[in-house]
Amino acid sequence: LSSANVYANLADAMLSRYITGLRTTGVRPSFRSAPFVQRIRAHTQIPRAMTASAEADKTNLAMSVALQYMMLSSEHKLEQVSQLMTDTTVYKSDALRIEVTGRTPIHDMMVGFFAKYSDVTWEVTALKVDGTAVEGSTDLVRVEVHFVRRWTEPDTRARTVKAGREWITVNTKDGSLAGVHVAAFDA
C-alpha cells in the first residue's frame, strides 16, 4: 500500500472505531452514522488520478490528524487530545475569546470547558486542506473543518446547535498539532 492509501485507511478505521465506541458505551451519536461516514470518506479519499507523492502524504496525514482531533474532542478524551499537542501548540478561539499556548495550559483550559459543557459534541460536516500557505514552513499543513456543535447551556439548560469552523494546523514531520484556531460561530 502507498502511504496515501494508509492514511485513507486510517481515516476509515478511526471512523469505524468512533461509531463502534459510541454504540458500545451506550452514547447516542449526534449524527446519523452512515451519511457522516460517507461525507468524511468523500473528503479523505484520494482522487484516482493522483499519484502517491510527498505532498499527498502530507495532505492525508494532516486530514487524518485533524479528523482524529475532532473525534477525540467529541468523545471528551482529553488525555488523548493532549498527546497530539506539543509545548508550542497554540489554541485560539474567537468564540471563547482566548489564546492558549502549550500542551498543559491547553489541556487545563479544555478540562474547564468540558466541565462547563459536559454534553458538548461536534459533528464534522466538511474537511479540506486550506490552500493558505503556512508562513515559514513546508511541514505545516492547515486543514479547514466545518462542523455542527451541540451542547446544553449551563445556565438555562437550553439545548443549543450552531454551525462553525476551525483551522487545524498539523506538523507533518511528527503528526502533532501546531495550532487550532476556532472561528466565531456562523450566524
Image (cartoon, rainbow, N blue to C red):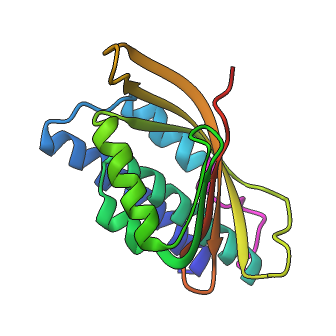
Left or right, residue 1 beside residue 58: left
The x and y percentages for residue 120 are: 36, 35
Q: Residue at x 34, y 19 (%)?
A: 155
Q: Residue at x 48, y 21 (%)?
A: 161
Left or right, residue 181 beside residue 77: right
Let me know if residue 48 is in the magenta part: yes
Task: Please tell me whether the stretch drawn in magenta is mainly helix, strand or loop.
Answer: loop
Q: Residue at x 34, y 48 (%)?
A: 112
The x and y percentages for residue 10 are: 45, 66
Nearest the viewer among 50 and 129 is 129
The x and y percentages for residue 91 are: 58, 59
Q: Is residue 173 above or below residue 61?
A: below
Nearest the viewer among 75 and 125 is 75
Q: Can residue 84 be seen in the rendering of this structure?
A: no
Let me know if residue 84 is in the magenta part: no
Residue 78 image-quadrant placement: bottom left
Number of numbered callouts drawn: 0
The x and y percentages for residue 125 are: 57, 36
Q: Is residue 141 above or below residue 93?
A: below
What quarter of the picture does the C terminus occupy?
A: top right
Residue 115 image-quadrant placement: top left
Q: Can residue 112 be seen in the rendering of this structure?
A: yes
Residue lying at the far bottom of the rendered structure: 173
Left or right, residue 41 beside residue 83: right
Q: Is residue 159 above or below residue 182?
A: above
Nearest the viewer among 5 and 178 is 178
Q: Residue at x 44, y 66 (%)?
A: 105
* Magenta-highlighted residues: 43-53
